[in-house]
Image (cartoon, helix red, strand yellow):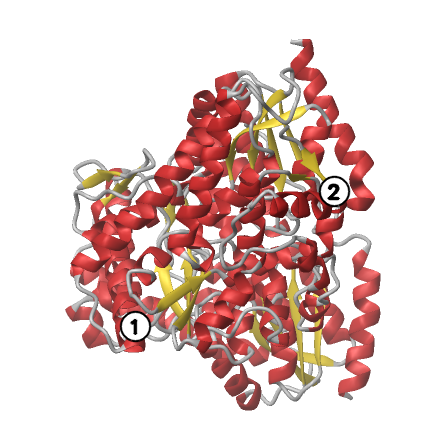
Amino acid sequence: MRSRPSAGVCLYLQSWLCAVQAEPEKDAVIMTTLCDPMRRGAEWMAELVECPVFLFAVPSTWQGSIPRRLYRDELHRLGRFLEKLGGTAPERESLMEWRVNYDAARRNLRNRQHDLSAYRFFEMLVEFHSGSFSASLVNETCPSRGGIPVGILGGPLLRDSTVLLNQIESLGGKIVLNGMENGERTLPLPFDPERFRDDPIEELVHAYFDSIPDPARRPNDGFYTWLQEITLVRALRGLAVLYYPWCDLWHAEIHRIKETLSIPVIDINLGETPGAGDSARALTRIQSWMDLIR
Amino acid sequence: MPRKISLDEWDVHYEHLRVQGLTEPFYGGPLRRHVCDGDFRLLKLQLDNSPAALRLWNFLLTEEDRLHQARREGKKIVGTMKDLGTVPVLAFSFPDVVAFYPDGAWWIPCVMELSAGLLNIADSLGIDESFCPVRAMLGAFETRAHFPIPDRLFCSVGATCDDFSAIAQRLEAMGHPIIWWEMPPRREPEEDEASVRLPSGFSAPQQLIDLVKMEFQRIREELETLTHETLPDERIREGIHAANRVRALLDELRLATFTAERTPLPALEMQIAEMLAIHFCSNREETINVLQDLLEEVHSRIQKNEGILSRSAVRVFWINPVADLRLMNWLEECGGRLCGSEYLFCHALDPIPEDLPPMEALARMALADPMVGSSSDRAERICRDIRRFGAQAAVISRIPGASHCALEGRILRNKIQTVLDIPVIELEAPPLADSMEPTLRTRLEALVETVKRK
């Protein structure tokens, strides 16, 4: 079974499987159960690559102690997996140093959002999420244009779909919220230095599991609370929900998002093939949406 | 003589049985009355002509009435979602609790031939045809025209399909509070990790079983609060024992039917019978009676060497439940017979261990769910069952819109073909497959031909 799944499968998962398979230098692949296709995709990945595949179980529920315990156990299990591959558990001091650098880079990145175009900010976020967070990343200047404050929201955005960011901004929008999965929405909370020193795993659980808003959580009221708050704080005048075909988790929330917010919300199906066919249709819809917001 | 007959023929046959002294349970009566209630699909189905099958159909099609009656009697109605087989065992251990799966609403569009408008309601709520037909559940809750709104709703999430999870979340957002519980994905134990062999034959780390046990304890406490009753372990043991009685009867029925030289009971009735395992169609004791009747009928037909199909019917193993019940008729009309099935819940068919503390036993059962582990695990179990029942071919029935089908079909097919060297086809049918009948029949006929030529 060396070929990848296609029909009826989320485009992001297909692209992910393809990209990882093509990556020549890898010792392991780590995937999570945030969505069911990814959970099942891990089995496909194990057939496509020679190296071990680790499936991290991210609990869907969050209330009570059981999901946190499961998440914490998974962090420990991941640690054991990495050690088995030859990794070494970090010394406490180097862990603390990492925390300081990570927090600083994340803070700087957030602060630079309004100086950058949506596309450049997205690029920096993707690099940050992939583990590159050197100071130089956020020192460049790239003045963004003004415009009507709008937000984008959804799962992970493929590079081929980022053309939409420029389209929105060229039509007079300014994307002040990048709520995509590989955007700012999934940046964890700043770490508390003392809690991190006392129990770094517990602080990771708090910063990531307790804090990142996501529609996949059950119940997902916390996601809607965050969405309503950030809409107010960033003074959004419109929101675009971007999703791939077969992404049930986002598709199912569109109606409720529209019911919840009092601003114009547009949903854009990013299509089976990135950059082809649907882009003209999407552009027309974005134009109408921007006209509505103006 | 045993045979399949239409509803028109059942009208005549029913009168004939009555004259001969047919005795029926409290929910008995002519099948025609269900058509008057809106179950129009009966007009197109071919049904077994035995009194046992009559009882089965009446039992199934009166479930909503029983749920409403239970509500009038002051019983607590508990809706259990997604886990397909384990939480109802706990719920039915309480004397005044009736549990059912609102998920079962997925068949309403078929049985009522879309007349209830449930899918249109789901569309209006933003849950369109790209989602699994279980979206009909939203319409059922919205109209309140089918089952009573449960006193409590439980739903497992985690290692579950996204469309159901999303649909259940939509249900909660419509104003129906849900008690969510975590079903972690089943994984292989690490070296040096305490592990357990589950009833289904899979393995799982004890750590995960302990987590699921804690979730079941939480469900137990919620039910105790709902009923103002404490549930001692001894009553759960009794509940497990009763559930195992159902499972044992079903196992005997499946083995007898699937391995008989001539098919004693049609595929359609076998699928309905198997569905009784997951929540006992809201009446556990009556489920036992229904299955006993069916088993008696099957044994009688086998003894008399009677069957409803030709001896040369090709033995087919069916994977996944069909959205349109007519497909089970078409399988047989195309020269096949049902010899084995895996309708997403083989863990509801296996006996629950009675030599363990009851909550540990239930947790192990829940983790034995074929859908919470890998598709390879599921395929292995399917291969074992194909061997057990002697199937010559397999059909993977994709559920339209279901998020798992796109990813597991090829894995299942490859494994079955590699291990057993039998032909496997995948097909997909919507809740009303009438317009696709020629295509689907052609696929089934081709499968039968492939086997016959071997």
Residue A255 falls left or right of residue B352: right
Q: CA distance from mark 2 to mark 1?
A: 48 Å
Q: Is residue A166 at least partly visible in the picture?
A: yes
B232, above or below B311, in the image: below
At horizontal 45% and vertical 75% (from top left) the residue drawn is B71
Q: Chain of mark 2?
A: B
Disc 2 or disc 1, which is closer to the eye?
2
Name the residue beneath numbered marker 1: B222
Task: Check disc 1 and report its element: helix, strand or loop.
Answer: helix
Q: Position of residue B153 (x, y in %)?
A: 43, 70
Label number found at residue B9: 2
Q: Chain of mark 1?
A: B
From the image, which quarter does the N terminus of chain B lie in?
top right
Q: Residue furthest top?
A: B454
User: Which secondary structure lies at badge 2?
Assistant: helix
The answer to which of B28 and A260 lies nearer the viewer is B28
Q: Is residue B132 shown to the viewer in this render?
A: no
